[in-house]
């Protein structure tokens, strides 16, 4: 039995309406098998009695996040532990702010003032340190940059990060530079008043020109590193994504997506849920030919696109919010990165070429 005497605080991957970073692999922190004489007792109270230093709030948060299971199943805080139950507590470790090493990294700063800065993150950059990513992250670069400005960075990454986006998603992020800005921006995300517009290339030809995807998003019950959609709402948290078709390429579609909530991998898992995974999303089934023909030339075309865009096709293009200091609305826009722009243009040319061939064939008949 693991006898470690505390439960590390776990960041909520469903933090108030934030777009989130890749999930660190959960590790087992504690395993308890209750004895035959165990009387029924709420699991939060049970763990508070068994784990020194654990608070009820931390335990309930871990239960909400699915980090605590009983006999292999997620349970709620009111679950009553009984004799013979096997309780497993997991966590995703991340270094404390004191462990963040400032690094001189290139940062594309779109806007900055005394309260905040807006960064256009490149794809491939992890936002915050975590398992296997303790350097080279956006937070490491921020620590270096803010120290140059003689700003206290002890609060990073907890203070500065208002929201996060996945490692392979490019685009706009707002970073708070003060406690006041952090609290104000967090409140705006929680109230769903922040404008976030994403551009994605997805597999398939969507039936409707626009629509809304709903369904609770939470960790997959078997594979904890990926997310899943639970339409009945028994697991996960409410998630709402609005989409609009921008351009159709027969086999793939260019769409804009606006987030009403911001759960971990929300766009990616929502699009997979409706049968249209993001182009080249290896986690959610988009890194294979989902729609199209069996012709060799078509397969080669898709493989070439994968080489140009070796990541999922998602870009956080627009970000707007009320400035925490001036109370004025500010909004930012970023251009599509070259890899996405090139692949979109290749699909456009491919479809136009097919249309021309068909037209020429019909004209010749």
Image (cartoon, rainbow, N blue to C red):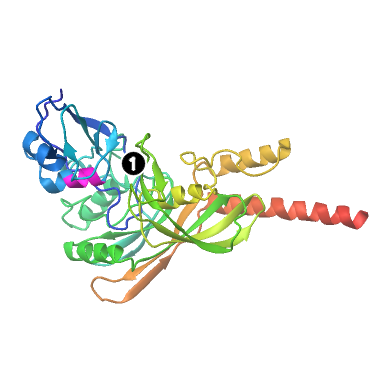
User: Residue at the location (55% across, 49% down)?
Assistant: 276
**Residue, far right:** 365
Image coordinates of residue 148 in percent, x first then y, are 22, 54
Please report the bounds of the magenta region as a residue range. Answer: 60-64
Q: Does the segment drawn in magenta span residue 61?
A: yes
Image coordinates of residue 260 in percent, x first then y, are 38, 62
User: Residue at the location (43% across, 49% down)?
Assistant: 169
Image coordinates of residue 35 in percent, x first then y, are 12, 25
User: Residue at the location (87% across, 52% down)?
Assistant: 361
- Which of the pair 289/71 is nearer the observer? 71
Which residue is tagged 1? 23
- Which of the pair 256/215 is nearer the observer? 215
Image coordinates of residue 295 in percent, x first then y, are 73, 37
Q: Does the segment drawn in magenta span residue 150?
A: no
User: Residue at the location (76% across, 51% down)?
Assistant: 354
Above or below: residue 181 compared with residue 44: below
Above or below: residue 343 compared with residue 40: below
Viewed as shown, does residue 193 lie left or right of 33?
right
Secondary structure category for the residue under label 1 = loop
Is the N terminus in the top left, top right, bottom left or bottom right quadrant?
top left
């Amino acid at each position: 039995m693991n006898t470690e005497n505390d439960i590390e605080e776990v960041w909520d991957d469903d933090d108030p309406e934030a777009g989130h970073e890749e999930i660190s692999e959960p590790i087992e922190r504690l395993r308890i098998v209750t004895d035959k004489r165990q009387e029924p007792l709420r699991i939060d109270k049970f763990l508070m009695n068994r784990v020194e230093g654990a608070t009820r709030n931390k335990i309930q948060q871990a239960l909400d996040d699915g980090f605590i299971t009983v006999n292999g199943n997620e349970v709620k805080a009111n679950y009553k532990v009984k004799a013979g139950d096997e309780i497993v507590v997991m966590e995703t470790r991340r270094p404390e702010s004191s462990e963040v090493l400032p690094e001189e990294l290139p940062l594309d700063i779109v806007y900055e003032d005394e309260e905040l800065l807006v960064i256009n993150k490149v794809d491939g950059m992890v936002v915050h340190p975590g398992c296997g990513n303790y350097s080279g992250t956006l937070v490491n670069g921020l620590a270096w940059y803010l120290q140059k400005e003689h700003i206290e960075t002890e609060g990073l990454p907890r203070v500065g990060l208002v929201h996060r986006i996945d490692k392979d998603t490019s685009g706009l992020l707002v970073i708070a530079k003060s406690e006041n800005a952090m609290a104000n921006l967090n409140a705006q995300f929680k109230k769903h008043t922040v404008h976030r517009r994403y551009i994605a290339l997805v597999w398939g030809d969507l039936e409707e020109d626009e629509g809304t995807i709903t369904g609770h998003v939470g960790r997959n019950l078997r594979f904890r590193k990926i997310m899943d959609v639970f339409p009945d709402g028994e697991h996960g948290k409410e998630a709402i994504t609005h989409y609009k078709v921008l351009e159709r390429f027969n086999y793939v579609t260019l769409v804009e997506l606006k987030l009403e909530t911001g759960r971990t991998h929300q766009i990616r898992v929502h699009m997979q849920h409706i049968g249209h995974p993001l182009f080249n999303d290896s986690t959610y089934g988009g890194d294979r030919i989902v729609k199209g023909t069996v012709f060799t030339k078509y397969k080669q075309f898709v493989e070439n696109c994968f080489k140009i865009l070796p990541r999922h096709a998602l870009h956080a293009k627009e970000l707007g919010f009320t400035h925490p200091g001036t109370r004025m609305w500010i909004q930012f826009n970023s251009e599509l990165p070259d890899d996405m722009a090139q692949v979109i243009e290749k699909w456009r040319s491919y479809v136009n070429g097919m249309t021309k061939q068909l037209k020429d064939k019909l004209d010749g008949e």
